[in-house]
Image: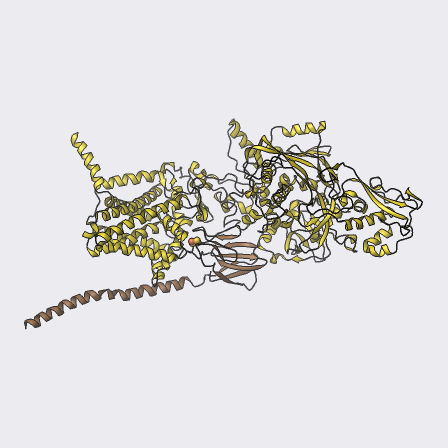
């Protein structure tokens, strides 16, 4: 009988402990809700982020916020101005190089890294001419 | 009294005894309270607008913001010291595990509350910092994305940061504070001290607000060490892992045994000190683009603004204007400034876009601090005209343009001084050193580059050099000039009251020839040539008196000095005297420099060029030809279209002509549907019909190698022979940096001559050789050099020239074929004689052809010409130079080559040019021999233009060809 009682006590204690131990599981559904709500909003935010720019650009580099257009020998190349190091916006050309203001990474007009800390080339962006040919649509800027 | 003393003492001691934790809590409370008050007027949709408005017009909120800012900084510093203090005392061992865990976690929230506060400024500094932080958090494995979004939201949306800043993080910090200290309030004394200190600092120093123009991006001071680390680390994930690792270590401190505990704390201390050093490096040794720069060479530092609250201007009556989406204080006072074209109106771009200063204050002195009074110099163009909102594409082009680099001037000059083997290579004026050649250039020529800084108000005149964008685009209206003169008088004599000028000089596309004149009236002198003036040395009395007029006190109203006596002489503002010559036909038709020279060649196309002619795009044949390429308005590039719109040069939907080689539009031209071509002069707006070339220019083989210039250049002005020496004792001037120096170079030149250009050969990029015009570029002796005293240099170099003295008719045949100067021998008597060795070797059978006597009479003066196939009769050219022979190279001073001689290769200032070789000289003189008998317009000579070889085959019995 005594033993039984002792056993029971142990069981009772264990149950409490057990509940306490697994209480953190309650967070799981919350984390799931958190995770999926954020995924949803990120999806919503990234729907159409293409930008329209005039097609008759001068030769050289023109900046359009998130994108930089390099026109050389009538060839267009569009780059994301987000530095591949830590995402700072590149707004400047110096001596024919893109220069990141934050930590000084340098890229040539083909987007290749000339000087670190960045190691990856600037992201090339796809573009297409609008039907009236007056504008360029930069996709996924 | 003693009690009072004791009280005072205990007050002080208690402050020392419980400093950091209490200060930290006190500052947190102050930050929270001021934050709550700030939240009332803070607009999270547009933080920058809120804060700039406070700075301009709301001293109370500004003070609150300062208090909030300084309380937060103090909170951070005090908390760190508090932690150091406790770790030092080892009290972490007494704290319960759970509390210690939450304390460790709160380290992250301290960082978060600080950085989110920084991000909530919404200025360009915080926008970039936000990007870095986001990317760093995204590196965290698995939860990176959701954590980033939850803490910082998406870029450009401040709501999540705001909520976390004022609620989540603050609540967590308050919770941890109360839980671990079991104390709800700091000591009153500490609170009072803390508040007083914060309040006093806040009265004087304002938290920074980045103006969006300054290109230095750094982030908050405590971020600078991290920035420095990130500068060196390519893979940011290492930094994230390391930071996490530090947090874990910190947590484990509680469980570490004595030895390990000490070691870890020691390491943490070292890392802390290292971080402080990194902060200093980041703050004081890093400038634009995180480049290394010495502190005294940059003004970045920690960027704390001294802006006393009581310096707020009376704002009740003033309106706050907003331009380009930002508030700008300048316009509250300067709201009636006129004189601009639409794109530069203050309503459109404000004052700050160009003049900088501080747009976020209405206090005059602070608003005007760091202002750029004359914007547009290339030294500041990146921050003024060339910012991303304005003309970012143009400034780098101008930087690279030959008018800024002076590449050709540098290479030729170094070549002359034997510092370069060949006159080629890419150079920049800014890189000039102190060698003989460079010092010479710095002392005599280096002011003529567009990067030379304009430091004085007033229009561009004959005396102006450089000025960046202003060099071309600055125009004073009469009213603006009047106001300026009045203002300058006021500043000088303070004799009258004055209204601040409100008519601003205009910045537009009316680029008159006067803008170019300052520099281009020198060296090649194309500006003066074009207008029909050639330089002379003259000391005649009448000109002396002209000089005096010019040397009197400069008067702004007579900036455009042309002093003109009987229209034959002109004395420039710098005292040089010019004589009237026939002007260029394009000038006579009313064309200005910019009617031919398009934006892409004046401002450059971004490429570096070795010599000026390489940057030039336009050619005569772009206008004067039977074929032409055209382009419609809709297909114009952005820049050209903008110029067309501004110049209103579009005519009835007609197409524009294209510069054929480069496919660049000539935006002031058009071709109508009948095929007629026109040019509209950009300033006077006259319409000129563009005529195709005469048939003589395009028919036949004889002259197909000739450039248009070779025939149509009426005259060139040149000097032949100049002596240059260095005088170490004289006072000189370094024109590159505009300062006085010891020592100077002195040039003594020969007389000026006006004559036809010499002709020579130029190899084009395509490999084709053409005949073009040349003048003596440098026939020079240099001695007494700066660095090598005993060295002597003699150079005889001809330079290709485009004189800009075009006429319609072109020069005569004889002016080339019978002209020693044209062929390269220099001035003199070129004679063709015919000998008959049988009858009398000395007898002159043919008359002596004297060019000077018969130049324009197309009549030959021979009597009995003989055939040359009789072996005893032959013709011979001879040359008698006008000038004495120089002993250095046995040539007269103005010669390029010796009579019937080849030359060594170092005789021109370009690697792709050369004088005529003997073969070519003979061919020219062969025609010259014909011209001694046949008139220029005779049938024979006209036929020979089409096909000389055929004409030669049917020469008559009377003809004697040169041997
Ligand atoms: S973000 Fe561009 S260099 Fe770091």
Q: Report whether B43 appears left or right of B371.
A: left
Q: Nearer the viewer, residue B656 or B925?
A: B925
Quarter-of-image position of residue B862: top right
Q: Quadrant of residue B69?
A: top left
Q: Looking at this view, is B65 or B394 the one in front?
A: B394
Classify the position of the N terminus of chain B by image quarter: top left
When the figure is inspected, residue B556 is found, relative to residue B299, above or below; the finding is above
Residue plotted at (35% across, 38% down): B204
Q: Is B363 placed above or below B677 here?
A: above
Q: How many numbered marks does the figure carry?
A: 0
Q: Quadrant of residue B579?
A: top right
Question: Whole-percent x and y of residue B847?
Answer: 89, 42
Inspect this view and state whether residue B254 appears.
Answer: yes
Q: Is residue B284 above or below residue B552?
A: below
Residue B828 as seen in the image, left or right of residue B304: right
**Chain letter for the brown colouring in the rendering:** A
* Nearer the observer, B342 or A32: A32
Q: Relative to B500, is B620 on the left or the right?
A: right
Instruction: Find residue B745 and report its horizontal and vertical position in percent.
Output: 61, 34
- Name the residue furthest right: B839
Q: Nearer the viewer, residue B251 or B170?
A: B251
Looking at the image, residue B817 sits to the left or right of residue B544; the answer is: right
- What colour has chain B? yellow
Colour scheme in use:
by chain
Does the rendering let one see residue B153?
A: no
Image x and y of residue B764, in percent: 68, 53
Residue that extends furthest to the left in the rendered view of this protein: A1
Q: Position of residue B16 (x, y in %)?
A: 22, 40
């Amino acid at each position: 009988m005594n033993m039984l009682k002792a056993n029971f006590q142990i069981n009772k204690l264990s149950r409490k402990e057990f509940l306490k131990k697994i209480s953190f599981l309650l967070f799981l559904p919350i984390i799931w809700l958190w995770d999926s709500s954020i995924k949803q909003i990120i999806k919503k935010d990234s729907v159409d982020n293409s930008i329209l720019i005039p097609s008759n650009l001068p030769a050289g580099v023109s900046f359009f916020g998130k994108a930089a257009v390099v026109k050389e020998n009538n060839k267009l190349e569009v780059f994301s101005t987000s530095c591949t190091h830590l995402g700072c916006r590149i707004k400047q050309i110096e001596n024919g190089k893109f220069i990141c203001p934050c930590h000084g990474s340098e890229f040539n007009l083909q987007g290749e890294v000339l000087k670190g800390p960045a190691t990856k080339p600037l992201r090339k962006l796809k573009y297409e001419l609008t039907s009236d040919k007056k504008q360029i649509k930069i996709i996924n800027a | 009294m003693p009690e009072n003393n004791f009280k005072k003492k205990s007050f002080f001691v208690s402050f020392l005894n419980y400093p950091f934790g209490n200060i930290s809590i006190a500052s947190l409370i102050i930050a929270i309270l001021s934050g709550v008050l700030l939240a009332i007027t803070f607009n999270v949709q547009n933080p920058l607008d809120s804060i700039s408005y406070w700075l301009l017009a709301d001293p109370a909120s500004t003070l609150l913001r300062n208090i909030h800012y300084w309380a937060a900084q103090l909170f951070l510093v005090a908390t760190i010291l508090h932690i150091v203090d406790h770790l030092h005392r080892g009290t972490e061992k007494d704290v319960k595990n759970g509390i210690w865990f939450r304390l460790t976690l709160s380290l992250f929230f301290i960082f978060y509350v600080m950085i989110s506060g920084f991000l909530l400024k919404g200025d360009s500094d915080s926008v970039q910092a936000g990007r870095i932080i986001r990317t760093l958090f995204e590196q965290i494995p698995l939860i990176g994305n959701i954590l980033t979004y939850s803490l910082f939201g998406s870029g450009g949306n401040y709501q999540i940061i705001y909520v976390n800043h004022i609620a989540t993080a603050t609540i967590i910090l308050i919770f941890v504070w109360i839980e671990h200290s079991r104390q709800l309030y700091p000591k009153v004394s500490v609170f009072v001290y803390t508040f007083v200190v914060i309040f006093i600092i806040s009265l004087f120093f304002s938290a920074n607000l980045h103006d969006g123009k300054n290109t230095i991006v750094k982030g908050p001071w405590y971020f600078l060490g991290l920035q420095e680390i990130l500068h060196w680390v390519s893979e940011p994930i290492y930094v994230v892992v390391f930071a996490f690792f530090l947090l874990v270590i910190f947590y484990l401190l509680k469980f570490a045994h004595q030895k390990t505990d000490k070691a870890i704390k020691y390491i943490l201390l070292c890392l802390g000190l290292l971080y402080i050093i990194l902060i200093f490096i980041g703050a004081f040794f890093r400038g634009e683009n995180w480049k290394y720069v010495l502190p005294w060479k940059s003004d970045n530092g920690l960027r704390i603004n001294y802006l006393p609250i009581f310096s707020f201007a009376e704002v009740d009556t003033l309106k706050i204007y907003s331009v380009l989406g930002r508030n700008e204080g300048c316009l509250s006072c300067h709201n009636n400034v006129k004189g601009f074209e639409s794109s530069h109106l203050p309503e459109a771009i404000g004052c700050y876009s160009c003049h900088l200063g501080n747009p976020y204050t209405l206090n005059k002195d602070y608003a005007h601090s760091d202002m750029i009074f004359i914007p547009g110099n290339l030294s500041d163009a990146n921050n003024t005209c060339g910012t991303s909102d304005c003309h970012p594409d143009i400034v780098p082009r101008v930087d690279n343009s030959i008018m800024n680099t002076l590449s050709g001037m540098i290479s030729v000059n170094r070549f002359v001084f034997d510092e370069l083997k060949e006159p080629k290579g890419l150079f920049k004026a800014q890189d000039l050193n102190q060698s003989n050649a460079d010092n010479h250039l710095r002392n005599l020529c280096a002011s003529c580059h567009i990067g030379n800084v304009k430091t004085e108000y007033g229009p561009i005149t004959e005396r102006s050099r450089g000025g960046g964008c202003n060099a071309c685009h600055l125009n004073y209206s009469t009213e603006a000039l009047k106001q300026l003169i009045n203002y300058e008088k006021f500043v000088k004599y303070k004799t009258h009251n004055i209204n601040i000028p409100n008519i601003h000089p205009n910045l537009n596309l009316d680029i008159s020839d006067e803008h170019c004149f300052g520099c281009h009236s020198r060296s090649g002198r194309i500006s003066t040539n074009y207008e029909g003036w050639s330089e002379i040395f003259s000391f005649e009395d009448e000109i002396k008196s002209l000089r005096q007029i010019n040397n009197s006190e400069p008067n702004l109203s007579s900036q455009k000095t042309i002093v003109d006596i009987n229209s034959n002489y002109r004395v420039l503002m710098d005292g040089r005297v010019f004589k009237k010559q026939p002007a260029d036909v394009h000038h006579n038709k009313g064309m200005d420099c910019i009617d031919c020279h398009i934006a892409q060649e004046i401002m450059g196309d971004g490429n570096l060029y070795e010599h000026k002619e390489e940057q030039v795009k336009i050619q005569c044949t772009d206008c004067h030809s039977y074929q032409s390429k055209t382009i419609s308005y809709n297909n114009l590039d952005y820049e050209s279209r903008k110029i067309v719109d501004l110049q209103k040069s579009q005519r009835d939907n007609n197409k524009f002509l294209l510069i054929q080689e480069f496919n660049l539009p000539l935006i002031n031209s058009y071709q109508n549907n009948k095929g007629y071509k026109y040019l509209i002069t950009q300033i006077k707006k006259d319409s000129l019909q563009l005529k195709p070339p005469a048939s003589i220019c395009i028919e036949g083989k004889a002259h197909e190698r000739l450039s248009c210039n070779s025939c149509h250049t009426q005259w060139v002005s040149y000097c032949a022979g100049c002596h240059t020496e260095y005088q170490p004792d004289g006072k000189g001037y370094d024109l590159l940096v505009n300062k006085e120096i010891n020592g100077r170079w002195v040039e003594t030149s020969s007389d000026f001559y006006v004559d036809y250009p010499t002709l020579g050969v130029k190899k084009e990029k395509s490999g084709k050789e053409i005949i073009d015009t040349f003048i003596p570029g440098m026939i020079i002796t240099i001695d007494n050099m700066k660095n090598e005293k005993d060295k002597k240099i003699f150079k005889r170099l001809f330079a290709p020239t485009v004189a800009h003295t075009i006429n319609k008719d072109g020069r005569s045949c004889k002016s080339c074929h019978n002209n020693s100067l044209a062929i390269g021998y220099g001035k003199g008597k070129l004679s063709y004689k015919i000998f008959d060795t049988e009858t009398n070797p000395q007898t002159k059978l043919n008359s002596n052809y004297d060019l000077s006597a018969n130049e324009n009479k197309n009549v030959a003066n021979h009597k009995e010409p003989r055939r040359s196939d009789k072996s005893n009769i032959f013709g011979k050219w001879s040359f008698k130079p006008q000038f004495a022979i120089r002993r250095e190279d046995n040539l007269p001073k103005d010669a390029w080559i010796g009579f019937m001689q080849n030359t060594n290769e170092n005789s021109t200032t370009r690697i792709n040019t050369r004088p005529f070789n003997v073969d070519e000289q003979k061919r020219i003189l062969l025609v010259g021999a014909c011209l001694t008998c046949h008139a220029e317009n005779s049938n024979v000579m006209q036929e020979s233009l089409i096909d000389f070889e055929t004409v030669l085959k049917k020469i008559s019995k009377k003809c004697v060809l040169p041997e």
